[in-house]
Structures are given as C-alpha cells and as structure tokens.
Image (tube, rainbow, N blue to C red):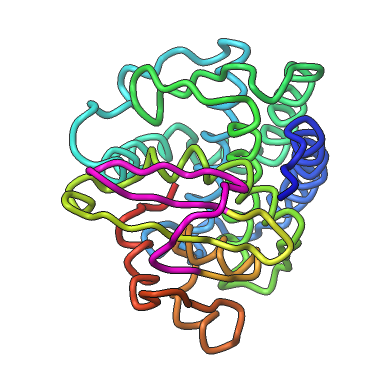
C-alpha cells in the first residue's frame, strides 16, 4: 500500500487554508445581522464570527505571542475534553465586543496571513503549542494547519446555514482536514469514560483517501493512516464531506447513510454509530 507524502500534503493544506481565509473574510464582510441565528443552536451569527476571531487569535498568538492572557479563559484540566472545550468556547466568544465583531473580517484576514507567513518553510512536524486543548498540549504544525482549515470551513458553514449567504466545502479540502487532523485529534478527544472496557477496531475508508485505522482499547485510542492489513470489527466507507460533517456534529449519521454517502460493513457493522459517541467533536 502506498503511503502519503507528509510534506506535499502539508503544502496542499496551506494552499487550501490561504484560499479559505480569503473566502472567510469576504463572508464575514457580508454579515448584515449579527443577531441572526446560526447553525450552532446556542450562538448567533455574531457569536460564530467572534469564535472564529478567537480561533485565529489563538493560532496566530501561539507563534507570535501576541496574546498571552489565557489564565482567565482556559478552563482547568478537569472533566472530559468536550466539557473543557465547551467552557473555553463560552468564555472566549466574549473576547470581542459588538463593535469589534464588525471588524472581524480584517482581523481574520490579517491573523491568517500572519500564521501562513510565520510558518512558511517550517516542516509539517514542527511543534505547535496548543494549551487551549489542555495544558502542555503540543501538536504538529500539520495538525494545527488542518485544524485552522477545519475551523474556517465548518464555522463558515455555521454562519450561512440559516441565511441566504453561500458557502461550500470542497471534497479535496475535506480530505485534507481528515488526513491532517484525525490521527492526532481523535485520540485526544476520546471520551475515556465511555471507552472504558471497549475493545474495537474501525477501518475508516474515506473515498479518494485517506484511510484510517481507528483502534480503541483500554480506554485509549490510536489512529494510523494507511495501516498494514489487520482484522477490523467495523468498516466505514464515506465521502470526505459526509464524514467531516458527521465527525464534527454538523449532520446526523443517518442522513449520509440514506443518501449512500456513508456505508457500514465488516463483521460488526452495527458498531458504526458508536464511533461518534466514543469520539467527541475535535
């Protein structure tokens, strides 16, 4: 089985992020009503935009040190990953007041360009500190770039889902997110309490690539791309966009299933829905 080229894929992810940053800035300029409902039930469109501003501030500041006052924002390393992330999002979304939210298009464009400029020439394995995922958490630059791309794509969708504004996610961009993000973030976001006593192996086949071996055992998860052949309990085949939207809780799994965009097979196909209960949204 042929593997992937980490350097080439990282370069593609950077190119996709550059294009997406420009699209996102245009979208933020088109927002006419900050109080309009978004695709995130608890947030308005303005809240989603503020969250995006915080994301770009955090990812850029991790490289430049622009913002260091995380003490009052980061939650304690207690509870599940999902609980901590929800608490973080609830506090971080208040970093931008109503007037500042009107200028977020320029803010995101500038911070996005800084992120790409500062990381130019760095390898995909370069360390990237991400304390908002837990104190001492260090990702690779490839994972961080994929995460910034996923945040931009998915929250762009959230802004437009209940409006007439247009936003599309390309299959190639979805593939890049899944390949760059999932091997690191799925183990990090495993719900350890639900995974206790679970021993299951999933063969996740994204149509057109990548292919992920997801093994949950002993309260921990490992995810390997293009793994050697082995026995799996459940095989999930999905289009890139369908798996992205299900994995990040933007659509229920039954929708792509009835549309033929996702299928479950293998010895125990009924275990497919369990994966989204074991892994919280990255």
Q: Nearer the viewer, residue 239 or 102?
A: 239
Task: Relative to 2, say whether 6 is above or below.
Answer: above
Residue 102 horizontal side relative to residue 266, left or right: right
The quarter holding residue 11 reads top right
Q: Nearer the viewer, residue 279 or 167?
A: 279
| Residue 49 at x, y percent in the picture | 56, 47
* Residue depicted at 52% across the width and 89% down the height: 258
| Residue 127 at x, y percent in the picture | 57, 17
Q: Which residues are magenta?
A: 212-235
Q: Is residue 208 magenta?
A: no
Residue 80 horizontal side relative to residue 209, left or right: left
Q: Is residue 223 magenta?
A: yes
Task: Relative to 165, say whether 189 is above or below.
Answer: above
How many numbered marks are there?
A: 0
Residue 19 horizontal side relative to residue 277, left or right: right
Q: Nearer the viewer, residue 123 or 200?
A: 200
| Residue 65 at x, y percent in the picture | 56, 10
* Residue depicted at 39% across the width and 31% down the height: 133
* Residue depicted at 72% across the width and 43% down the height: 3
| Residue 279 at x, y percent in the picture | 36, 53
* Residue depicted at 41% across the width and 15% down the height: 69
């Amino acid at each position: 089985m042929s593997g992937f080229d980490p350097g080439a894929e990282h370069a593609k992810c950077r190119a996709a992020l550059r294009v997406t940053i420009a699209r996102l800035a245009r979208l933020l300029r088109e927002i006419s009503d900050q109080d309009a409902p978004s695709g995130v039930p608890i947030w308005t469109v303005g809240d989603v935009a503020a969250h995006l501003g915080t994301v770009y501030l955090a990812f850029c500041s991790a490289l430049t040190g622009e913002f260091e006052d995380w003490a009052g924002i980061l939650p304690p390393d207690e509870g599940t990953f999902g609980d901590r992330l929800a608490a973080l999002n609830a506090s971080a979304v208040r970093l931008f007041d109503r007037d500042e939210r009107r200028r977020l298009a320029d803010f995101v464009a500038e911070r996005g360009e800084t992120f790409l400029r500062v990381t130019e020439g760095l390898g995909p394995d370069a360390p990237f500190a991400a304390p908002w995922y837990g104190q001492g958490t260090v990702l690779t630059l490839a994972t961080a770039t994929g995460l910034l791309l996923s945040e931009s794509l998915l929250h762009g969708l959230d802004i437009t889902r209940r409006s007439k504004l247009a936003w599309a996610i390309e299959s190639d961009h979805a593939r890049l997110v899944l390949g760059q993000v999932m091997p690191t973030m799925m183990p990090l976001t495993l719900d350890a309490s639900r995974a206790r006593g679970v021993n299951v192996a999933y063969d996740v086949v994204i149509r057109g690539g990548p292919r992920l071996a997801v093994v949950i055992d002993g309260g921990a998860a490992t995810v390997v791309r293009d793994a050697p052949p082995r026995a799996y309990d459940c095989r999930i085949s999905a289009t890139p966009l369908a798996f992205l939207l299900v994995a990040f809780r933007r659509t229920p799994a039954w929708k792509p299933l009835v549309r033929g965009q996702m299928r479950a097979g293998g010895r125990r196909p009924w275990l497919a829905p369990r994966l989204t209960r074991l892994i919280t949204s990255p």
